Amino acid sequence: MFDVTRYATAAQSIVDAGRFLYDRGWSPATSSNYSARLDHDHVAITVSGRHKGQLTAGDVMVVDLNGQAVQSDCKSSAETLLHTVLYQIFPNVGAVLHTHSVKATVLSRLASPGSALDFEGYELQKAFSGVETHEGILSIPVFDNTQDIPALAEQTREWFQARPDQPGYLIRGHGLYTWGKTMADCLRHVEAFEFLFECELETMRVRP
Ligand SMILES: [Zn+2]
């Protein structure tokens, strides 16, 4: 069982996040999925296929950390396991956001297979929780896209167990995953990533 009041708060944070992310153009055409932790064993997550700019509490359901629906006949996102694996690895993660922006999609397609994108020297790196200087390197892996979500979930588990300080990843030609202690932290991470992606693409444009 989960706490109903916590569910209501989490569902509202997801609805609000959807409005913001859709308005920015980062969750078009019913793509993307969002989640927020309720307790040690449960997360609230968007129901599959809903318009992210028009979410209501009825578009948010509860799953356990194995991705199984709890007290719901709805179907959660096909990518539910990519969320739950992060809650399993990081007990202090409170929210996970997955977006499908143009810049994340384009940049991920330019990265070479099996590589990571390194962001270095940007003041905005400090927007990520725990980062206090522009002098570090944010190393964002780019995983190949697949419809085999359990396999991809295991790949991400392996990567982030070894590098727990990195705040997100890209899936090639698909989008971004990032997380945070709170929904506010997580939204700030999405915005920071979008800024960094735009800087990288703009740099390629002016200095090909
Ligand atoms: Zn997706």
Image (cartoon, grey):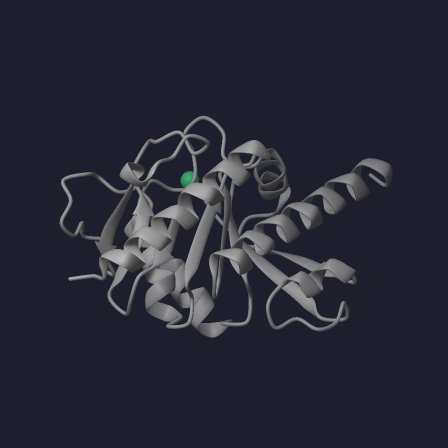
Query: The N terminus is located in which quarter?
Result: bottom left
Q: Position of residue 43 (x, y in %)?
A: 30, 57
Q: Position of residue 160 (x, y in %)?
A: 46, 67
Tell me which image quadrant ligand 1 sits in. top left
Q: Position of residue 60 (x, y in %)?
A: 30, 43
Note whether 11 is above or below 25 in the view shown. below
- 44 and 5: which one is in front? 5
Residue drawn at (54%, 39%), measured in percent from left and top? 20
Q: Position of residue 113 (x, y in %)?
A: 55, 48
Say left or right for 194 vs 62: right
Nearest the eye: 200 or 71? 71
Q: Quadrant of the C terminus?
A: top right
Q: Give the image quarter of residue 76.
A: top left
Q: Residue at x 70, y 62 (%)?
A: 125
The residue sitting at the top extreme is 29
Q: Is residue 152 visible?
A: no
State the count of labels.
0
Specify whether 43 is left or right of 142: left
Q: Residue at x 58, y 55 (%)?
A: 189
**Does the rendering let one see residue 15?**
yes
Q: Is residue 86 left or right of residue 202?
A: left
Quadrant in which residue 203 is drawn: top right
Residue at image point 46% right, 31% down: 53
